[in-house]
Amino acid sequence: ACCAGPVHRDVRVIMVGMAHSGKTTILRLLRHDIRTKVCGGRPVELVSQSGPGRLVSFASWDFEGPCVPEPTRLHHYRKRPDAVIFVVDSSNREQLSEARGHLKQVVSAVGTKDSPVLVLANKQDLPMALSAPELADALQLHALPAGLWCLQTSCGLSGRGVFEGFEWLSA
């Protein structure tokens, strides 16, 4: 008898974070074609990559300023994602409180009981970047279910840490 190969399915990932945290840089690092459309009054970057029997789709948008979109109203939240990637600029200490609030909002909106949350602590190449333990505390990651989140330090420009984070998601 012959064993069948792995079962493939479509994978839906949302990538969110504060403006200028490095989401687009990370998407470009993955060498995807990026399409932008307006959704809920905000630009949303859409990325799809297909392979044999598999489609991975990313929807990425910014949280910025006083007009932060209500996550439950955005089209890409209507179907629960398989994973959430939250990108944070680890050198921007002034935005951490706001970033923490948005992360909580996203987790609440998508119901991540079974969906892993990858936090990419981006811009680790900058001199004022916070360490992983400092960011975990500032974002209150320990309040999320154990085993369903990972904080990965990264640099979107060089790719350092980005692929390790994606490996954790695929495990």
Image (cartoon, rainbow, N blue to C red):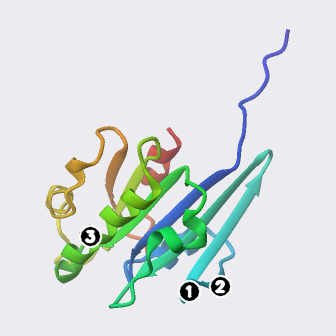
Residue 128 appears at what percent x and percent y?
Answer: 16, 77
Residue at left offset 55%, top offset 83%: 40
Q: Earlier in the sequence, mark 2 or mark 3?
A: 2
Q: Nearer the viewer, mark 3 or mark 1?
A: 3
Report x, y in % for residue 153.
Answer: 31, 60
Who is closer to the viewer here, 143 or 26? 143
Q: CA distance from mark 2 to mark 3?
A: 25 Å
Question: Please, what is the three-letter code of the amino acid marked with disc 1?
Answer: Pro
Determine the CA span between mark 3 and mark 1: 20 Å
Position in image of residue 75 (x %, y %): 60, 71
Disc on res. 101: 3
Q: What amino acid type is highlighted by mark number 2?
A: Lys
Q: Is residue 101 left or right of residue 94?
A: right
Q: Upstream in the sequence, badge 2 or badge 1?
A: 2
Say which residue label 1 marks. 43
Element at label 2: strand
Give me the residue at 17% from left, 68% from top.
130
Residue at x 43%, y 61% (from the top left corner):
109
User: Left or right of 120: which side holds 3?
Assistant: right
Instruction: From the viewer's side, name the closer residue of 143 and 50.
Output: 143
Question: Is residue 118 something that shows in the picture?
Answer: yes
